Image (cartoon, rainbow, N blue to C red):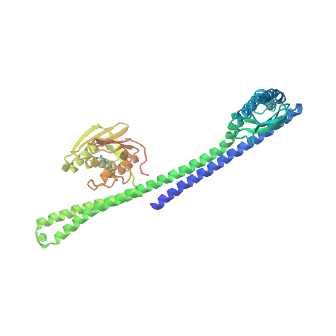
Amino acid sequence: MKKKSSILLLSALAIFIVIAVEGFFVYHIYHLETEKFDFRYRGILQKGLDYLNKKEENPGLGGVFYLMEFPAKTALEYFHDNDPDTVKFKENVLAALHKTLTEKQKVDGSLKSYLKKMKIESEFNSIFRITHLVLLGDDLDIPIYNSKKDSTWIYPDTLGIKKNQIPVNHYSFIGDHYEIGIDYYVDFDHKKAEVFRAVTASLIIAVLALLIVCLIFLLSVRNLMEERRLSQLKTDFINNMTHELKTPLSTISVATRTLENETILSDREKSREIVTVIRRQNRQLTKQINHLLEISMWERKQFSLDRRILELEPFFTGIAESFRWECQERKCSLEEKYCLVNKTAWLDEVQITVALHNLLINAIKYCTQEPLVILEVSCEDRLIISVTDNGIGISKEDQKRIFDKFYRVSTGNVHKVKGLGLGLFYVKQIVEAHGGTVEVTSRIGKGSTFTINMPAHGKNKNTVS
Ligand code: ADP
């Protein structure tokens, strides 16, 4: 069992590694696709700028550089008057020039027209980042901002460059009142969607592979649990069988030892009594051994139906009658409700008798009060047989499993109620061989109803597979 647990642990670890490796690959594919997108669009945009450059110098920014002279000049005057050599002053100057730059620039307009002309997706946002700015005074130059030195400034968000923005160009300009350097970035609206589309195929393959691995893992776990359950059931079965065989054997052993006693041997009456006990226990042993042989026969799938047309009413009254005889000791009441006048069905008489007997016996076996059993049978196109009892009932969880081979409800698995967990398994096999179904409805402490439903004259298979 330890070995199996470590196999499970190793499988779980393998799945974890597969997930990590797949995640790593998908992440890298995403990055490669992003870089591919950036490379492609950067090339296109630079070609566009080259094309526009041929028409004018600094296309889209020529006029802006001229307009930025005004805030630069105002700042210089303000500086002369108040000499405010503070970070606040510098931030304000930078903000004023940046505002003029972003509001008045026409670079993106020109580029968008170019992209449209080239029939390329043209929805993007422009981002201008001032990399350095110096005010040029008459007597001295006032450095305002340098991205390398002043990177810790709190300044408009537009200075923070986000990952999906593509660097396109760098502009430098020296005017009358200022000198400036600008990085130009572009952020395409469709970038994420396009990259995601390119990654989708890899993502689907990765998820599919993962699902298959998980499925295999789950199936292995299920098989392992099933194996564990069967081995547990087998152990229970062997324990029960050993108990069933040991009881008559020890009785026989005690009885024979008693018979060896000379005084008992001379008492004919006593001897006959002991012989009867031996014979009864011997019968019990034979029954158990036959049971075992029967199991092995079912295992080898040699069970076959021998169907004939049966008059139903006498058939069921006969079964009820012998059941009453069998249970005389338990003061059991059996109520019969038939709707079978002149009805016949095509059944294997022996097997249906076994199935019904198993249901009736269980009805009194698993009952702690005076048993009241109701046998109800009706037949139209289908033969419906139900056995209702006032027994201990079966929990919802156990109802799903009581038809499994060797399954016994754990409280029922104490030797107080003898059994091998095969009765209901046989019932199910027999009913299914007739093309029918068997179901149970039950409530703990309130009793159970087992219902067999099968075609009365079906052309169904007559061999259990
Ligand atoms: P066995 O009676 O030999 O244990 P069965 O296959 O006939 O095996 O029944 C399986 C289990 O289902 C039983 O151990 C018992 O716990 C439960 N069971 C069967 N019939 C009834 C019933 N009528 N009322 C309550 N429990 C039942």
Residue 189 showing in the rendered view: no
What residue is rendered at 25% in x and 45% in y?
Answer: 320
Q: Going 60% across and 46% down the picture, which residue do you hit? A: 207
Question: Is 168 situated left or right of 352 in this image?
Answer: right
Foreground pick, 35 / 239: 35
Q: Residue 402 at what x, y percent from top left?
A: 36, 48
Along the viewing direction, whichever of 423 and 149 lies nearer the viewer: 149
Q: To which quarter of the image does residue 419 belong? A: bottom left
Foreground of the two, 320 or 226: 226
Please report the residue visible at 73 percent of the width from the left and 40 percent of the height from the top.
150
How many labels were placed on the picture? 0
254 on left or right of 209? left
In the rendered image, the quadrant that contains the N terminus is bottom left
- Where does residue 106 sit, x and y in percent of width and height? 80, 28
* Residue extending farthest front: 82
Q: Return the residue nearer the eye: 86 or 6.
A: 86
- Image position, residue 305 (x, y; %): 38, 50
Seen in the picture, residue 186 relative to 423 is either above or below; the reply is above
Q: Position of residue 165 (x, y in %)?
A: 72, 38
Q: Is residue 103 visible?
A: yes
In which quarter of the view is residue 97 placed? top right
- The reply, left or right, for residue 249 in relation to residue 455 is left
